[in-house]
Amino acid sequence: MSSKLRLGVIGAGLKAAEYAQSWAAMPEITFVALADVTEASRQRLVDIVTATGAPAPRCFTDYREMLSACRDEMDAIYISTPHAFHAEQATAVAEAGLDIFLEKPMVTTVAEAETLIAAQKKSGVLIVTAFQGGLSPLVLDTCKRAEAGEFGELIAIAGTIWESWASNYAGHWKQQPAISGGGFMFDTGAHMMNTVCMLANSDFDRVSAYMNNRGTAVDIVTAVSARLKNGALATLTAAGEGPPGCASHLTFFYSKAIVRIDAWGGWREISLEGKPGTREEAEILGNPMKNFLAIRAGLLENSGSVEMGLRFARLWDAIKQSAASDGQSVFIDAA
C-alpha cells in the first residue's frame, strides 16, 4: 500500500475546491482521479492540484467510469455532490471496496441509510461523514464527559440555528427539492440535528414538527418538539430567513450541569453544579481530512459513522412525516 492516501473525488464543486486548497499541499495526500459533470469544475480542481507541483488527476464525467478505470489506483473517495446523490454514489464506492469521506448529510432517508450500511458491512470499508461538529474536539470531549456521567442525567435539549439562507441560496441546487433532499433544516440545520444526535446519545422516540416554505419549493423555517428514548425532551428551531449571518445555540440541560455549545463545535460553556461556566473556543475545522486520516489510522473514534447517520436519518424522516401531516406526532421505531 502507498504511504500516501490515494484519493479520488466525486463532485468537484465549490466545497471540494475549498478543501483541495489545503489537501493538495498535504504530503499525506495524492489526488488520483476526479469525476464531475461540469468541465469548469473539473478544470478548477485540476488547477488547484497542479499548482502545488503535483501531477494532474485523471478526469471523468461519470463517477462509475472513474471507479471502473481507477479502482486499483485509489484508497479512498471524497464525495461532495448534491445531497440526493450521496446514497447511490457512496453505496457504489463501498461496493468497490474503497473508504469514503462523505459530505454531510450522509443520506436523505432511512431506506438509503440502511442500504449504505448493508454495503459497508459487506465490504468492511470505512465511511466517515464530514460534519464539522461531529469532528470537533469540543463536541467529542462533551460526548465523553456526558457518557462518563459527569453531567448527570440528560433532562432536556433546546436547539436553535439560523441563517440568511433563503436569500443566500436563491436559485441554488440547495433549493431544488429533487436533488437537495430538503431545505434549510436539512442543509444548515443538519449540523444542529447531527450534534444533538451525538450529544443526546439516544435515538428519538416521538417527533412533532411544522415547516414553512415561505414561498419557496423547500422548507425555510422548521419547528420540532420531540421526546427521546432516554426520556429527555427536545425542541429544535431552524430559521432560514432573516438578516445576514449564520449562528446556532444548543443547550443541554442535565441534572448536574447545563452545557451550551455551537452546532459546529466552535464554542462551549459548561455550568456545573450551579457554578457559571466560561466560554471555551475552538477553531471550526477547516481541514477535516486530518481527522479522516486519524480515524483511518485508528487514532480517533469514528464519530461520523454510518450508525450515527442512521440515527440522523430516522429523525429527519420523522420530521418530514410529521410536518406533512400538520404536526401529527410520529413514533420512531429504531428496533
Image (cartoon, rainbow, N blue to C red):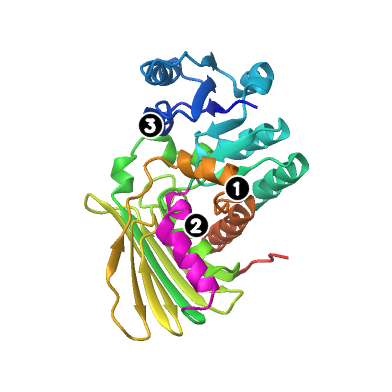
Secondary structure state at the residue bearing disc 1? loop
Circle 2 SS class: helix
**Rendered residue at 33%/55% (across/down):** 282
Find out whether the residues at labels 2 and 1 contact each other: C-beta distance under 8 Å: no
Labels 2 and 1: the sequence-earlier one: 2
Q: Mark 2 points at which residue?
A: 194
Looking at the rendered structure, the kind of residue marked 2 is Asn
**What residue does disc 1 label?**
298
Residue 37 x/y as whole percent = 51, 20
Q: Which amino acid is tagged 3? A: Ser
Q: Can you name the residue that lies furthest to the right here? A: 122
Q: Is residue 138 magenta?
A: yes
Of label 2 and label 3, which has the lower sequence position?
3
Kindly identify which numbered label has been placed on residue 119.
Answer: none
Q: Is residue 254 above or below residue 43?
A: below
Q: Nearer the viewer, residue 239 or 198?
A: 198
Q: What residue type is labelled 1?
A: Gly
Q: Does the magenta stretch include residue 335?
A: no
Residue for point 47% across, 60% down? 140
Q: Quadrant of the C terminus?
A: bottom right
Q: Which mark is residue 22?
A: 3
N-terminal of the pair, mark 1 or mark 3, is 3
Q: Callout 1 environment at 10 Å: few (<14), some (14 to 19), or many (20+)?
A: few
* Magenta residue span: 131-150
Helix, strand, or loop for circle 3? helix
